[in-house]
Image: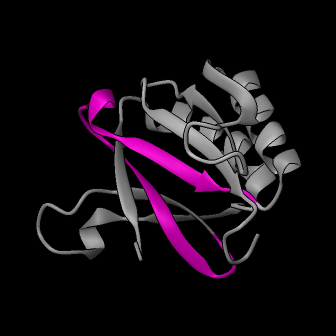
Amino acid sequence: MLDHLFLSVSNIDRSIAFYTAALAPLGIVNRLDYDGKDGPAGHPDLKGFGAKGRMFFWLRRGPVAPDAVHIGFAADSEAMVNSACAEALAAGATLIHPPGAQAHYDSRYYAAQVRDLDGYRLEFVYKSWQPGS
């Protein structure tokens, strides 16, 4: 299980606004700023997102590599997938795949894919057969 992920972005303020909007429908609504000077030498400043008392998705300013990362965010329903996709698009994302069944994986795999403002691939996913669904 993953504990956290750092994603380098080109414009931190723009990305905070984007992810604040796009992740809210998934219940990822907690925000935390970490000052890099409080860590070891060279630690970056981080802008965190999380839910249920856990911070797990962090933005940092730096060079982007959109083809190196694909991030899947879990949703609790098809409606949450639809809402997250709509919010991401309203915040400036580019649509890759509209919400719908991804039968090439499983008929119960419901997802939407977008590119964020730096070109990273984001997927909002509902898998009805998985725990917590």
- At horizontal 75% and vertical 41% (from top left) the residue drawn is 84
With respect to residue 78, does 116 lie above or below? above
Q: Quadrant of residue 53?
A: bottom right
- At horizontal 70% and vertical 45% (from top left) the residue drawn is 107
- Of residues 99 and 86, the one drawn nearer to the viewer in this rendering: 99
Could you tell me how many numbered marks the image carries? Answer: 0
- Of residues 116 and 16, the one drawn nearer to the viewer in this rendering: 116
- Of residues 9 and 68, the one drawn nearer to the viewer in this rendering: 68
Residue 69 part of the magenta segment: yes
Q: Position of residue 128 (x, y in %)?
A: 76, 62
**Residue 56, visible in the rendered structure:** yes
The residue positioned farthest toward the right in the image shown: 79
**Residue 64, visible in the rendered structure:** no
The residue positioned farthest toward the left in the image shown: 41
Q: Which of the image's four quarters has the C terminus?
A: bottom right
- Asked whether, in this view, residue 125 is left or right of residue 64, the answer is right
Q: Position of residue 12 (x, y in %)?
A: 45, 38
- At horizontal 52% and vertical 28% (from top left) the residue drawn is 116
Q: Position of residue 82 (x, y in %)?
A: 82, 38
Q: Position of residue 131 (x, y in %)?
A: 68, 77
Residue 32 part of the magenta segment: no
- Asked whether, in this view, residue 104 is left or right of residue 70, the answer is right
With respect to residue 22, does 72 lie above or below? below
With respect to residue 16, does 5 lie above or below? below
- At horizontal 76% and vertical 44% (from top left) the residue drawn is 81
- The residue range painted magenta reads 51-75
